[in-house]
Image (cartoon, rainbow, N blue to C red):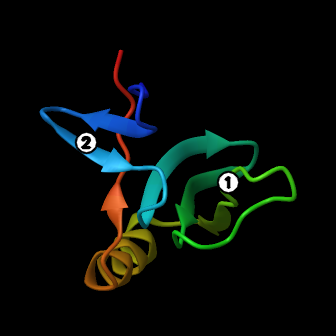
Amino acid sequence: MLDNNGKYFMGKEKIAMSDKRYYIMYNVGTTKYLVNYHDGIQKHKDGSDFFSMKSFKNKKTMSNFISELLNQGYRERRWLE
């Protein structure tokens, strides 16, 4: 969810839309794990954030990639219901 200042609610803390962030999707098509990540800089022509994607066949390589993202300062964006 977004608040009026363009920040995502992540539990009690908020993350700005321009921050480095990632999220994981499972079983998309024939892909078992799909990680979408935004570097905080890249934008589409309409000004919306551009997310890069990386797909994985096993959990070990995905968790290694997520560890690299966390070391680079990325934060997980969680969906709130």
Q: Amino acid at mark 2?
A: Lys
* Left or right placement of residue 46 versus residue 52 in this view: right
- Residue closer to the observer: 40 or 30: 40
* Left or right placement of residue 7 versus residue 12 in this view: right
> Is residue 80 depicted above or below 37 in this figure?
above
Q: Residue furthest left?
A: 12
Q: Give residue 56's quadrant in the image.
A: bottom right
* Left or right placement of residue 75 versus residue 46 in this view: left
The structure residue drawn at horizontal position 31% and vertical position 49%, both measured from the top left corner, is 15
The structure residue drawn at horizontal position 42% and vertical position 26%, both measured from the top left corner, is 4
Q: Tell me the residue that label 2 is attached to.
A: 14
> Is residue 35 depicted above or below 3 in this figure?
below
Frontmost of labels 2 and 1 is 2
Mark pair 2, 1: CA separation: 30 Å
For residue 31, the mark is: 1
> Is residue 39 depicted above or below 32 in this figure?
below
Q: Give residue 53's quadrant in the image.
A: bottom right
